């Protein structure tokens, strides 16, 4: 297959590109680098099956030659309010990537009669009133909140994707991606794993908000990419959650990371504050992914952290 | 003021144009007539303070001369699944009007440093779990349902409007419009008032689904327009509900309409079915409109129906 991947220089887009190339497909990567990192694709330079177009998906997209699949992964995605790359600091670009970008990429897929896969997110569930979240849950999102620039853009993108499926008969798919970690994750992403890894590698105490009993679910990137690849290859049209349902307490994360990095600085407890970038508790119900895609996450937390560590070390100039 | 009104040939857009002209303002109407009706503006031909541009708001908008306010009212809005003008039958156009149209009209407002007013809707509350709905309610919308093409487009439009306000300092306003009726309402709108008026004027029995005890809230158009005009003139940025909170049972509507039209055909009861176009119960909490805009609806149901009747008679060729 010849596959267009938008957001190819991002954390997920670059891993997807690698997987598709490994499976023998041809990949056309697209990115405008407002949050994507050219370094994530540097290893693909010279690969005859990979080509790259620097382009903003909010503008009309032209790709020469045939396209068999379009995967729309372009969007700012970091919840970090303190980072210039956080979506709350790129509100208009985030909404344009979700609306105009989805419209333009659906147009490419329609012109080529290609399979279309939208990268959606567990953020469409907002601050959920049901746990865990199944795909039939409608979500609980504040339409005019600060975070709505991301959440509502993705809800709109899902609705538009389903409209193209229903009205134009387009062969579409929607993946709802839960928290993911791994190499090429942005070091200032703002979520707990990169925060802890950064602190541990710099020999600082890990900042634990509250008593550390609050939980998070994190999926290692190779598991996530495997689920997305299976979805792409399936004939599924309705949304599918892909994420790791194992809930880990913040304290367990902190201890695992300090142990792995042999960080002697321990922990530092602070009272909960709004500066924590990832306040919601979300956990995927993976029944559909298991049933429809025969997918389950395989990489345990310790193993995933071990595989992630060298990247963070390198980013911090420690090797 | 010189005001751009998109969707000016629609039910609400045309009444808004009339009100603004009556207040001494200059109006530039814009419409592409996919659901708007040129007849709604016919009486303004020759008015030196009114001009018209035939244009699809999904494409880049250029208006010569200065603009003091932009009111974005362009969108398919009928919930009637059996009408070619219903938004479920115009899904892509509806989503483009909500996303691309809002983006383009916000761009015009920003270029002119103009006041911006977005026509949002009670549909953003979806199938609400709270009654009545205050502006702080987050809503309950199925992002991938058939109706999501309208609901999610409007939620996206609200989020984008707030992003322009927060990020660009644009002087924005959002009105959440509840069910409205009056002259120029489309006869095939699919809601209970036009359905009943049409049946009564054609001397047919009025179709009542279930036992008729279910309720609806309908606002007469002059009340609604008055609320919107007050909002435009205010400095308010957060959403404001405008609608009539008086709940009337379907049976009361039917009896009032049969009495007014002297329809001898009575009622016909049918079991509830999905073909009823307006299934949700929604009722506005008007506290904010009262407090912030000193607005309250004034026109009683009987009076509103009496004022609406001649238009429906004319549409049906009965005079």
Image (cartoon, coloured by chain):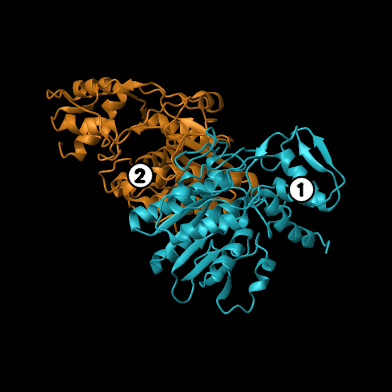
Chain colours: A orange, B cyan
Q: Nearer the viewer, residue B303 or B216?
A: B303
Q: Quadrant of residue B151?
A: top right
Local packing at callout 2 (Cα closer than 10 Å; few below 14, some 14-19, many 20+) is: many
Local packing at callout 1 (Cα closer than 10 Å; few below 14, some 14-19, many 20+) is: many
Residue shown at the point (48%, 34%) measured from the top left: A139
Residue shown at the point (24%, 33%) measured from the top left: A195
Q: Can residue A61 be seen in this snapshot?
A: no
Q: Can residue B267 be seen in this snapshot?
A: yes
Chain assignment, label 1 = B
Q: Nearer the viewer, residue B53 or B220?
A: B220
Residue B92: image location, x then y, percent: 59, 52
Q: Quadrant of residue A190?
A: top left
Location of residue B148 with respect to A297 vertically, above or below: below
Number of the label disc, if any, that sits on residue B257: 1
Position of B279 compared to B287: left or right? right
Residue A92: image location, x then y, percent: 39, 53
Residues at marks 1 and 2, CA–CA distance in whole angstroms = 61 Å
SS class, disc 1: helix
SS class, disc 2: loop
Chain assignment, label 2 = A
Q: Quadrant of residue B22?
A: bottom right
- Placement of the C terminus of chain A among the 4 image quadrants: top left
Residue B185: image location, x then y, percent: 68, 56
> Circle 2 is placed at which residue position?
A10
User: Contact, CB < 8 Å: mark 1 with mark 2?
Assistant: no
Residue shown at the point (15%, 36%) measured from the top left: A318
Location of residue A66 with respect to A306 vertically, above or below: below
Q: What is the tally of numbered marks visible in this picture?
A: 2
Location of residue A169 with respect to A252 vertically, above or below: below
């Amino acid at each position: 297959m010849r596959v267009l991947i938008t957001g190819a220089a991002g954390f997920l887009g670059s891993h997807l590109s690698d997987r598709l190339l490994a499976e023998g497909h041809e990949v056309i990567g697209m990115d405008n680098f407002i949050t994507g990192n050219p370094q994530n694709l540097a290893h693909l330079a010279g690969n005859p099956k990979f080509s790259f177009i620097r382009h903003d998906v909010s503008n009309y997209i032209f790709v020469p030659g045939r396209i068999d699949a379009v995967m729309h992964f372009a969007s700012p995605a970091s919840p970090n309010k303190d980072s210039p790359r956080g979506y709350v600091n790129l509100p208009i670009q985030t909404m344009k990537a979700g609306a105009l970008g989805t419209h333009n990429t659906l147009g490419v897929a329609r012109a080529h009669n290609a399979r279309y896969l939208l990268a959606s997110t567990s953020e469409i569930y907002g601050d959920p009133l049901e746990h865990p979240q199944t795909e039939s849950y409608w979500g609980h999102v504040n339409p005019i909140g600060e975070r709505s620039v991301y959440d509502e853009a993705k809800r709109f993108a899902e609705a538009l994707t389903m409209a193209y499926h229903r009205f134009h008969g387009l062969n579409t798919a929607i993946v709802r991606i839960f928290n993911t970690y791994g190499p090429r994750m942005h070091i200032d992403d703002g979520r707990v794993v990169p925060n802890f890894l950064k602190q541990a590698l710099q020999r600082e105490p890990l900042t634990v908000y509250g008593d550390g009993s609050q939980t998070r679910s994190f999926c290692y990137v190779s598991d996530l990419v495997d689920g997305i690849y299976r979805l792409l290859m399936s004939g599924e049209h309705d949304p599918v959650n892909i994420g790791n349902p194992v809930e880990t307490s913040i304290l367990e994360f902190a201890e695992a990371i300090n142990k792995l990095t042999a960080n002697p600085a321990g922990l530092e407890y602070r009272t909960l504050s709004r500066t924590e970038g990832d306040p919601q508790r979300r956990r995927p119900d993976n029944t559909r992914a298991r049933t429809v895609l025969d997918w389950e996450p395989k990489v345990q937390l310790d193993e995933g952290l071990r595989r992630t560590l060298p990247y963070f070390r390198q980013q911090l100039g420690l090797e």
